[in-house]
Image (cartoon, grey):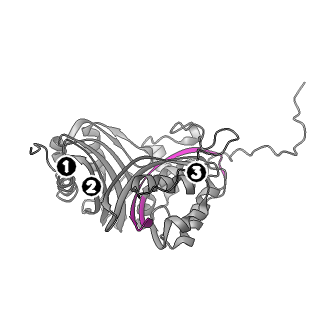
Amino acid sequence: MTSSFPDPRTFILETTDRVWNRKQIGELYHRAYSNVRVHGPSGRSCHGREAWMADILSWLGAFPDVQVTCEHLIVNGEAADAWVAEQRLLSGHHLNPSIYGLPTGRSFSIRAHLLYRVIQGRIREVWQEVDEVGLLRQLGLDPLQVLEQLETYYGLPCPRDGAWQPVGEAERTRGQLPPPALPPLPDPFAVDRFLRRCYDAIWNWRLVGEVENLYAPQAEEYGWGEPRHGVQAIRSWVLERLNMLPDLTVSIDRTVWEGDGRRGYHVAALWTLVGTHAGPAYWGPPSLHRLRLQGISHHYIRRHRIQKTWMSVGELGLVQHIAPRPSAEPPPTPASQDAGPIETNP
């Protein structure tokens, strides 16, 4: 029986091309539900089709010559109910005023990752992450100054004035007990279970040496920092993040994959990171701020090892949480164990 709904792969490719490359933003009236939910970068989300169109127009207004190329598209499900993961490359010039500041005229080329829920031929929900810090650097803008502007003029909540995004305790361990036991590597191979075990072993169990067993010797990673080539560079990058957020935990919220053992698998993972900025980072000394980050990663897995990874993460939200401001008070300092008694006024 032939479905009356469009093929999800063709549907998303056409939507991206018509809305972003042909600037036919009104196509979303026929391609998205009126109450569509969009989970945006750095925690900036919007609800409703009109709000989503306004967000897209803010981008196209600032970068009117932007062109979007779909690099990877992964589809799971049927035409009536599908999950679609897209990795796209955006290129253009900063020609008009934007939320980041006045036009610089500079060119840029950045990646973004999106995950769509498509139900009965229309977009119901979207998760999207874009390399905003990379964009600002290519435009010659200072991320800290841009954040001050966003907080002052556009009402973006400042975490130093209260919780921007409520974050609970990182539930990685069970009191004094270790994290839940790692399952064995799937046999026969199951790519979803393999990837979830990779995240658990490296991030939640702190078995960073497993990078050598789970990644190919010449593996490559792109996103959230400089490109990383080889297992030593990837291991160093993981240790740097764990040093910055020593209590972090990572959970995979959704995977979308396709492929087979012969050609390899393309897997997209929507994940959430929770942790406390208690260690040194490029953006500043420990702030002791709790934070939650959303990211989307695309992995190419072949011969039971990760060969390549591309990721986008809300790094600008991370910077907003932990980077010191010129007007900000110094972060609290934990009391030393050998400190003297606390004096109180009679």
> Which residue is denoted by mark 2 in the rendering?
60
Kindly indicate the quadrant of the structure image that contains residue 257: bottom left
Q: In the rendered image, which quarter contains the N terminus?
A: top left
Q: Is residue 59 above or below residue 262?
A: above
What's the distance in space between the residues labelled 3 and 1, CA to CA? 42 Å
| Amino acid type, mark 1 | Ile
Instruction: Give the residue drawn at x 9%, y 45%.
Output: 2
Q: Sequence-wise, which precedes: disc 3 or disc 1? A: 1
| Amino acid type, mark 3 | Asn
User: Is residue 310 a member of the stretch shown in magenta?
Assistant: yes
Instruction: Give the residue drawn at x 18%, y 51%.
Output: 11
**Image location (x, y in percent) of residue 30:** 15, 42
> Which residue is denoted by mark 1 in the rendering?
25
What's the distance in space between the residues labelled 2 and 1, CA to CA? 10 Å
Whether residue 282 appears in this view of the structure is no
Q: Which mark is residue 204?
A: 3
Label 2 secondary element: helix
